Image (cartoon, helix red, strand yellow):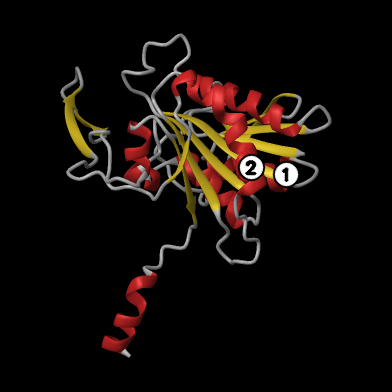
Amino acid sequence: MRILITNDDGINAPGLKVLQRIAHDIAGPTGEVWIVAPAFEQSGVGHCISYTHPMMIAELGPRRVAAEGSPADCVLAALYDVMPQRPDLVLSGVNRGNNAAENTLYSGTIGGAIEAALQGLPAIALSQYLGPGNRDLDDPFDAASVTGTATIRALLDKADWDNGDDYRLFYNVNFPAVAGRDVKGIRVSAQGFRRDSYFSTEPHLSPSGRKFLWIKGGTQGPSAPGSDAFDNHDGYISVTPMRADLTAHDRLANLKAALE
């Protein structure tokens, strides 16, 4: 198997090293693992592409390339320049922090998986929740390290990859904030919504007196039962099938009746 991996935390991020080990397990001794990842951190860029300016790429080693762009840029660079053949699978992550609930909409990790799916490729985004249960471990990514390979294999063997749809399925996986031995299992979860949790800004003054704004994230508590953040807080790996189609299909009929 030929696997492409990318992320949004940057090519030197510890989560990418975790994913590299997982990808080699999945690819097997005769497979290939290619890394095309951002040269610098790209957290929060979503599905951004560098449409108005070029990006520099640099080969750092065999099958290891850094790109001055977003995760979606990295997927495009891999498919149309770096890799001699298209990959069989694209893995994005392992992100430092969760990409559950509304975080999904901002995530560059998800953006890489979206671009792969739009290009017609099987894709999985993977993120590691951080919290009291793993923050002080020697390896905060222990849950992903211990259970990541089995989770991906289960998806490859049993999940629906529905090649026929225009907006191809991809999968969003979040590992709970516990040690690997304490992971309770896998739950298939809907994307959650955290009530009263919003991104915001916090002003700061520089030594010269100029005003700058830092973007602040909201609280990272659980969402409703049956959703990803709830299941992660309950000690489970959440797996969420997703598509890039943003149409509110449940509203089409009523809107047609009202407007057409």
Residue wearing tag 2: 90
Q: Secondary structure at mark 2?
A: strand
Q: In the image shown, does 213 or 152 lie closer to the viewer? A: 152
Question: Where, quadrant-wise, is the N terminus in this rendering?
Answer: top right
Residue wearing tag 1: 87
Q: In the image shown, does 209 or 158 lie closer to the viewer? A: 158
Question: Where, quadrant-wise, is the C terminus in this rendering?
Answer: bottom left
In this rendering, would 103 be left or right of 84? left
In this rendering, would 128 be left or right of 60? left
Per the rendering, the mark at residue 215 is: none
The alpha-carbon separation of the residues under discs 2 and 1 comes to 7 Å
In this rendering, would 74 be left or right of 247? right
Rendering quarter of residue 206: top left
Residue located at (33% from left, 32% from top): 233
State if disc 1 and disc 2 touch (CB < 8 Å): yes
* Crowdedness near tag 2: few (<14), some (14–19) or many (≥20) residues, C-alpha within 10 Å: many
Q: Amino acid at mark 2?
A: Val
